[in-house]
């Protein structure tokens, strides 16, 4: 089996001698809003005042919306910056302040960012180098998906939604005309304050979005998280669509800012900025599911149809797309991290290109020899060898037209390289991922390698719950688990050759417990691996790379409990961090200050926090009634459950929500009959299995958690499932680990 199967690149590198000259004048004004996260603002100012941005940034404006706490230069004494300009606002203008500050800037361009994210200098340099006639928005992968969900293309409409706070380079003229438009529309004071929600929609021009690498700073004081924030944002997005429909219906061509003649909808390029170098990678590979490309002009021809179209597109998203895109987006090809990789969702086809644009505000002068090296999975070598590589100064004339070597590198030579800027790989044949690997012809097998061990646990648990523990070959499964052992780390990876991760390690332990095979486990080393991931704050990291999440805290507690080593954990520190993640609604976030979320699949919140506290005997931290009320509110009219307000129902929440309610002994607070009907309606009556919602493709993840939900609902013919450990209840009871919980009584008939 292959260790990693990647469509194109895990890293792309150009090697050359570079000579730089700095003759340009800085022409960008940075605008950062301050409210209550001053330490973050100081760090951002220090980063953007770095010498590497000396010929990019002219002024850094810190607009202080906190009129009760004026800022002074001394607040930045630890990181002095001669470009700093403090504006103490007499009132809180909220996000309108961004545009006011930019409109009054002395430069033609403005860089906008929030105070809870850090954008690296090389990305700012790339944004400035690429901005021309339209704004550019830098987003993390999940927000990139949201931006395409909130989009409409029709003869008169071509817009998508994007936030500015992750880092956006905008034209001062756009800020000025946008404010003029709000005045012309006689927008209310509150609408102007929430200007971010209107900016990209009212432009009626699909924004250029880069999938990038904003670094979260957190720091509390969030304004837009939680149920209230979601409702407020959607209210103003809806108002923006109403304004846009009004503008188009008016027949008036004199509106400022708005593009009233959108270009014909065409394929969207995917772009990602490099880390460690100022460059951008562009791809024409299809990166969105087919449903996003279907013609829907007749169905969604008004801006006000935005949320209806969003719901339609969301219902078509398969779990593989979201997980693949967030973990293997194009940005992973140029993040200077050889352990990450870019994997396209769709097949590569003849004519597809990947183009690397080498950028710098200072002109780059190459020598006459350059090597372009690709780090790719071995299965992709024939594809890349059959492609052609060329370079250009203007993207019109390309030279030469040569192939990569078997070592996936090419040497380019010639005098014309001195002015080369663009380097392109051009696919000359179709590439069908279904032929990847020798053990299977199923592309999804390779696409989900990072979930392999988890998937075995999901499938085995479902089989135990349905009364068929013998369905899989026990010794074959155990042999596969052992092949996933990371000898260096002392834990398990998701697939042979993968680095150890706490989630894969828990799945391995759960499988071995179900098979009564813990004697195959090196318990001392596993304990050391798990405990090594606990941070000083009490939260756990998932692996050596340091992603922090209360989901990992639950996984650590669960795993240590199953192998009888919970006494080696600092229980107080673990529980105290979870306590700090509790929110006003009774729920929990995946870190301090994050909004409540019912699931564990995407972001660890209510279920893992409640289950961890149960194992630690610290349910005193939980506000039982408030949390049970919030969980019961997750049920929608069709009977399904969602993970947080304003989201669609999903079968997997049948377990995430019910498990927490079972621990709180309040399963009766939801309509069990309607939920049962919803889960059963998501079955595939021909092939079996359960999907996320009716009509979609089934998968083992939703099959397991649909069955788990049915078990807690007392569905006949199923065995009891322990909601704390998400394992067969008899096994947990036999180990003496059962905690207090209560599902519905098992029924004898449907």
Image: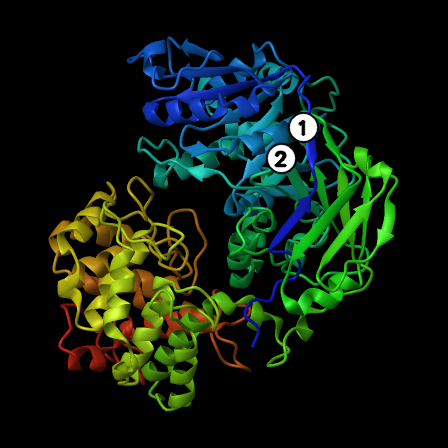
Secondary structure at numbered mark 1: helix
Counting from the top left corner in percent of width and height, residue 660 is at 25, 61
Q: Is residue 405 above or below residue 123?
A: below
Q: Quadrant of residue 346?
A: bottom right
In this view of the protein, which residue sits in the foreground, 710 or 431? 431
Res 305 label: none
State the CA–CA distance, disc 1 to disc 2.
Answer: 9 Å
Counting from the top left corner in percent of width and height, residue 179 is at 58, 16
Task: State which mark lies toward you, 1 or 2.
Answer: 2
Q: Is residue 733 visible?
A: yes
Q: Quadrant of residue 489?
A: bottom left
Where does the N terminus fall, quadrant-wise?
Answer: bottom right
Q: Is residue 660 visible?
A: no
Counting from the top left corner in percent of width and height, residue 187 is at 53, 19
Q: Is residue 168 above or below residue 294?
A: above
- Mark 2 highlights which residue? 278
The mark nearer the N terminus, 1 or 2, is: 1
Counting from the top left corner in percent of width and height, residue 511 is at 33, 78
Mark 1 and mark 2 in contact? Answer it, CB < 8 Å.
yes
Q: Quadrant of residue 318?
A: bottom right
Residue at 40% x, 61% y is 640
Secondary structure at numbered mark 2: loop
Disc 1 residue crowd, few under 14, some 14–19, many 20+, Cα 10 Å: some
Specify whether 616 is left or right of 522: left
In this view of the protein, which residue sits in the foreground, 703 or 609? 609
In this view of the protein, which residue sits in the foreground, 209 or 183? 209
Residue at 44% x, 15% y is 81
Q: Is residue 220 above or below residue 425?
A: above
Disc 2 residue crowd, few under 14, some 14–19, many 20+, Cα 10 Å: many
- Mark 1 highlights which residue? 129
């Amino acid at each position: 089996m292959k260790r990693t199967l990647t469509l194109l690149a895990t890293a792309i590198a150009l090697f050359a001698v570079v000579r730089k000259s700095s003759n340009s004048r800085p022409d960008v004004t940075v605008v950062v809003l301050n409210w209550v996260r001053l330490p973050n603002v100081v760090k951002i100012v220090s980063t953007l005042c770095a010498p590497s941005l000396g010929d990019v940034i002219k002024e850094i404006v810190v607009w202080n919306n906190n009129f009760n706490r004026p800022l002074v230069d001394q607040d930045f004494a630890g990181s002095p910056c001669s470009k700093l300009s403090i504006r103490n606002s007499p009132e809180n203008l909220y996000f309108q302040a961004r545009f006011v500050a930019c409109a009054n800037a002395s430069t033609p361009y403005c860089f906008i960012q929030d105070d809870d994210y850090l954008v690296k200098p090389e990305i700012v340099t790339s944004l400035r180098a690429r901005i021309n006639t339209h704004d550019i928005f830098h987003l993390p992968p999940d927000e990139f998906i949201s931006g395409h969900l909130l989009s409409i293309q029709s003869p008169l409409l071509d817009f998508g939604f994007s936030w500015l706070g992750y880092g956006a380079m905008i034209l001062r003229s756009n800020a000025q005309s946008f404010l003029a438009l709000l005045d012309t529309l006689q927008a209310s004071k509150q609408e102007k304050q929430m200007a971010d929600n209107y900016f990209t929609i009212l432009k009626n021009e699909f924004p250029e979005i880069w999938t990038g690498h904003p670094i979260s700073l957190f720091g509390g004081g969030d304004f837009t998280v939680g149920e209230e924030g979601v409702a407020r944002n959607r209210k103003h997005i809806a108002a923006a669509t109403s304004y846009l429909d009004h503008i188009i219906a008016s027949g008036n061509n004199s509106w400022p800012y708005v593009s009233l003649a959108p270009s014909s909808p065409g394929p969207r390029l995917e772009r990602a900025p490099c880390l460690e170098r100022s460059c951008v990678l562009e791809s024409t590979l299809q990166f969105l599911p087919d449903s996003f490309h279907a013609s829907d002009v007749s169905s969604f021809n008004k801006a006000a149809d935005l949320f209806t179209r969003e719901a339609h597109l969301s219902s078509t998203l398969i779990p593989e797309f979201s997980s693949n895109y967030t973990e293997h987006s194009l940005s992973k090809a140029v993040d200077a991290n050889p352990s990450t990789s870019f994997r396209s969702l769709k097949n590569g086809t003849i004519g597809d290109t990947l183009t690397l644009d080498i950028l710098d505000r200072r002109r780059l002068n190459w020598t006459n020899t350059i090597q372009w090296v690709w780090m790719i999975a071995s299965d992709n070598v024939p594809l890349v060898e059959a492609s052609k590589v060329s370079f250009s100064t203007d993207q019109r004339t390309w030279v030469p037209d040569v192939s990569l070597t078997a070592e996936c590198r090419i040497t380019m030579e010639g005098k014309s390289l001195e002015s080369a800027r663009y380097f392109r790989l051009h696919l000359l044949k179709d590439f069908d991922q279904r032929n990847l690997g020798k053990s299977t012809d199923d592309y999804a097998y390779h696409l989900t390698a990072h979930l392999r061990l988890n998937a075995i646990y999901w499938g085995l648990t479902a089989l135990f719950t349905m009364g068929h523990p013998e369905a899989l070959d026990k010794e074959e499964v155990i042999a596969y688990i052992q092949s996933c052992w990371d000898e260096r780390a002392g834990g398990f990876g998701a697939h042979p050759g993968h680095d150890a991760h706490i989630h894969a390690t828990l799945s391995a332990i759960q499988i071995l417990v179900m098979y009564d095979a813990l004697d195959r486990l090196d318990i001392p080393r596993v304990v050391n691996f798990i405990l090594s991931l606990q941070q000083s704050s009490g939260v756990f990291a998932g692996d050596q790379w340091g992603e922090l999440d209360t989901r990992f805290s639950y996984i650590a507690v669960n795993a240590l409990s199953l192998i009888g080593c919970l006494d080696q954990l600092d229980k107080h520190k673990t529980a105290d961090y979870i306590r700090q993640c509790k929110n006003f609604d009774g729920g929990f976030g995946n870190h301090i200050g994050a909004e409540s979320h019912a699931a564990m699949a995407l972001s660890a919140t209510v279920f893992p926090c409640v289950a961890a506290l149960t194992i630690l005997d610290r349910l005193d931290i939980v506000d039982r009634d408030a949390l049970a009320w919030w969980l019961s509110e997750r049920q929608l009219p069709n009977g399904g459950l969602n993970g947080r307000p304003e989201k669609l129902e999903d079968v997997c929440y049948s377990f995430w929500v019910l498990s927490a309610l079972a621990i709180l002994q309040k399963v009766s607070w939801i309509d069990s009959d309607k939920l049962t009907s919803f889960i059963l309606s998501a079955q595939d009556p021909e092939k079996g299995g359960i999907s996320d919602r009716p009509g979609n493709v089934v998968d083992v993840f939703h099959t397991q958690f649909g069955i788990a939900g049915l078990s807690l609902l007392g569905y006949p013919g199923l065995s009891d499932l322990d909601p704390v450990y998400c394992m067969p209840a008899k096994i947990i009871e036999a180990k003496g680990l059962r905690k207090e919980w209560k599902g519905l009584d098992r029924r004898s008939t449907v």
